[in-house]
Amino acid sequence: DTGVSQNPRHKITKRGQNVTFRCDPISEHNRLYWYRQTLGQGPEFLTYFQNEAQLEKSRLLSDRFSAERPKGSFSTLEIQRTEQGDSAMYLCASSLGRLAGIKRAETQYFGPGTRLLVL
Amino acid sequence: AQKVTQAQTEISVVEKEDVTLDCVYETRDTTYYLFWYKQPPSGELVFLIRRNSFDEQNEISGRYSWNFQKSTSSFNFTITASQVVDSAVYFCALSEAYYNQGGKLIFGQGTELSVKP
């Protein structure tokens, strides 16, 4: 299977602990996105990478959140000093960006998500 | 600012009924893309369709069809002869278009479709 994969699928932690999630995009996809989805809501954008460069961060991404994509392949999302409000599904998506002389938006393909519960 | 509204929170139909999921969007951009995703109980978002703002042709794929109307800023999704396997949450999303860079998706709140046998 060459889809987007995320690990772990589930994470239960105590308030104040640090957690790290991993996302492996579809191979050859140069763009990688992180979203957060709370119960009953649509996903909300957190941050986006083009290769290894982090090009955009949402205001939702507080100082406790950090994301990396060191070699332009997999990405990690770390949450420090977790709070109960961080409980959510964290979704990763990837897309293939091509050089083009027109404005476009590629299709983003999503992974299965990591469900975080902070007690 | 960009916004997507899915006014129908939940819809319940009986198998074989047709059902339409509404999506209304707001954007100041002239070039943008619209998407529909399906999220079954397993949680993974499954891509269904992408449409750019210059292509107002309706699209049909099997039992699925999409009606894009720029005049009313709507991109509605119809399932014909619904089946139990169609039960899921469906999301409409909007993205700006850029030269050589990616863009975030703005999602609606989703419509939960329940198809009963």
Image (cartoon, coloured by chain):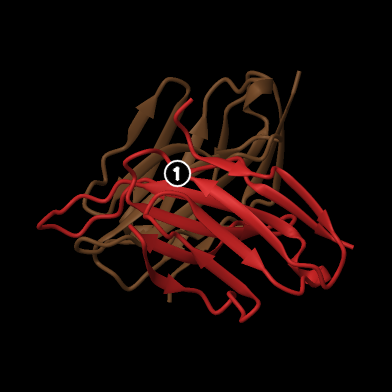
Chain colours: A red, B brown
**Is the residue A79 above or below the residue B74 in the image?**
below
Q: Secondary structure at mark 1?
A: loop
**Quadrant assignment, res B97:** bottom left
Furthest residue toward left: A101
- Asked if residue B22 shows in the view, the reply is no
**Quadrant assignment, res B15:** top right
Q: Disc 1 marks which amino acid?
A: Pro
* Label 1 CA crowd tier, 10 Å (few <14, some 14–19, many 20+): many
Q: Position of residue A51 (x, y in %)?
A: 33, 57
Residue A113 or B1: which is nearer the viewer?
A: A113
**Is the residue A97 above or below the residue B96 in the image?**
above
Q: Position of residue A95 (x, y in %)?
A: 36, 47
Circle 1 chain:
A
Residue A78 or B86: which is nearer the viewer?
A: A78
Residue drawn at point x = 58 percent, y = 27 percent: B18
Q: Which image quarter is the C terminus of chain A in?
A: bottom right
**Is the residue A61 above or below the residue B11 in the image?**
below
Residue drawn at point x = 58 percent, y = 75 percent: A61
**Quadrant assignment, res B20:** top right
Residue topped by disc 1: A25
- Asked if residue A100 shows in the view, the reply is yes
Q: Is residue A3 left or right of A35 when viewed as pictured?
A: left
